[in-house]
Amino acid sequence: MSAPQQPRARIRFERVSVEFPSKAGPLRVVDDVSYEIGEREFVSVIGPSGCGKTTMLNIVAGFMRPSSGSVLLDDRPIAGPGPDRGVIFQEYGVFPWLTVRQNIEFGLKLAASRVPPGEHEEVCRRYMQLMGLAEFADAWPRMLSGGMRQRLALARAYAVRPEFLLMDEPFGALDAQTRSAMQDLLLEVLQAEDKTVMLITHSVEEAVYLSSRIIVMTARPTRIREIIRVPFGYPREESLHEKPEFGELRSHIRELVMKEYAAQARQTLRNTD
Amino acid sequence: MPILRRIALILAPWALVVLAWYAIAYSGLINPALVPTPGQVAARFWQLLFHARLPADIWMSTQRVFLGVLLGIVFAVPVGFVLGWYRTVRGFVDPLINFFRALPPIALIPLVIVYFGVGELAKIVILFYASFFSGVIVMYEGIAQINPIYVRVARTLGASDGEIFRKVIVPLTVPHMLTALRVSLGVAWATLVASELIAAQQGLGALIQNASSFFRLDIIYVGIICIGFIALAMDLLLRAAARRLLAWQERIA
Ligand SMILES: Nc1ncnc2c1ncn2[C@@H]1O[C@H](COP(=O)(O)OP(=O)(O)OP(=O)(O)O)[C@@H](O)[C@H]1O
Ligand SMILES: [Mg+2]
């Protein structure tokens, strides 16, 4: 692969630190972290549990601010949450009181919607089709399986045409088959519509398969351990999992990650003593 | 066939109660003068219904309960909402609410008479008191349990504060409002007799008290059973409404 050209930075972490107040004084969670996520990049963030991944995602989503440093979106500070950044939460957050169709329409019908009313029906139908939910248009979420709820959350986020997708362990609760199907579906959808993606995951396999770059974080207070460029182009196919280069990269990252998980575990044990 | 079975299953426990009642009445264990039989009570019910003021009593009591619960809920919903939504406010107000809720309305009657007289207002105040404090607790405990993720999701989809209130918080509040209403209605019927201790001429509570001064046990039974059945009918109605309104919920309590 030729030296990849650095795309325009869209999300930029500049010397970001986050501290939470705790009984034993301020708890430093994110420690002076800087990185960029470029236009149309798919960046995965991987690191031990409790290191501060969700915290970083929450800052980009606009739910909180760093204690010091700044996170810039297209070179501007983030004022709050907005429909330009679609967030997929680990618990999905599908609205139980709305049907599948109404869930997807929710964002379309808000005052801030950028989708003209004439297109709502079409947009809604398209994403139900794409996510395999068309037959369940009028079903309540309680009738859906976990994988279907996940797809509904994706459809709902997509419908408002976000430029960014921020995903927090979106496939963590799914079984292996559904998970793999959802990964392919995600890649397929991204192929059709360019988006800049930040994905948090614990799965090295998933990170390598989906991402253009992977950021490995250290134990808390988290710093960047290593940033790895994934040398495979898109579209990607299942057979990629079998390639020796894939395996090598996976082993390398797994080793890094294992060390950090062990460090975090030691730290947690020490703190509970 | 299954519908017959269902009806049988619904009627069975009632039949059992009536049978047990007959058994006690005829067993001789208790002085028969103290236990009218179900047949006697039914006959008395029939007579009161067509030849006395029972319909007026039922109407009066229902009206009072309605008014008391209506007022109680009108205040309980917004107050419960604020307490449920703002944790810090709840911390301060919660002990106060539990203090007032624990007071039996009957103990307040002398004070109510002093401040509100012996008219209709006094009775409504008692019922309001009972339904407000029971409703407000159900309401705020329900609201406090609303998962904040829905608000976050709505924000990321671009919802304004007003839209979040209308499109997320209101639909999530409805089930708790309905539960609060059911609880308040139950408590109000339970408090009715106490409220009608205050110089009531009419109402099921008044009927029971008059009967008790003349030792008319059959009439007392009629009054009690009427209260039970009206409360049950209202609860069934509310539950049916909830089932339609809350079809999205996993289960209806
Ligand atoms: N609001 C908060 N107040 C205090 N501490 C917090 C808060 N949010 C997070 N933390 C702490 O910050 C640390 C990082 O949390 P975060 O949720 O970002 O971890 P994570 O990397 O997403 O973990 P996981 O992989 O388990 O989801 C944790 O130790 C957590 O206890
Ligand atoms: Mg997390």
Image (cartoon, coloured by chain):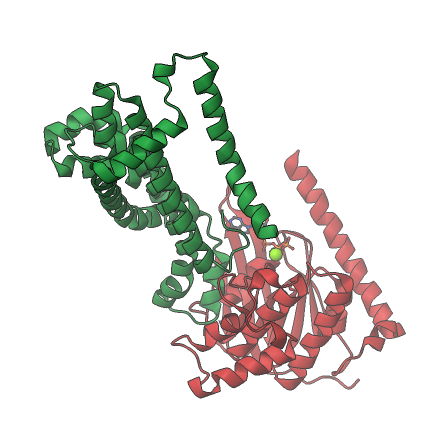
Above/below status of A202 relative to B226: below
Above/below status of A160 relative to B80 = below
Q: What percent of the width, then of the height, locates residue B218? A: 31, 25
Rendered hue of chain A is red
Q: In the picture, which quadrant includes the N terminus of chain A?
A: bottom right
Question: In this rendering, does residue B239 appear at all?
Answer: yes
Q: Residue A208: percent from the left, percent from the top?
A: 76, 70
Q: Is residue A58 above or below residue A23?
A: below
Quick one: B240 or B158, which is closer to the camera?
Answer: B240
Q: Residue at x 41, y 55 (%)?
A: B241
Give the camera-side residue of A65 and B132. Answer: B132
Identified at 60% across, 71% down, the residue is A136
Question: Which quarter of the picture shows residue B136?
Answer: top left
| A189 sits to left or right of B20 | right
Looking at the image, residue A2 sits to the left or right of residue A224; the answer is right
Residue A171 percent location from the top left of the image: 68, 64
**Chain B shade in the render:** green
Depth check: A54 or B22 in front?
B22
The quarter in which the C terminus of chain A is drawn is top right
Residue nearest the observer in this picture, B179 or A268: B179
Give the x, y percent position of residue B83.
34, 45
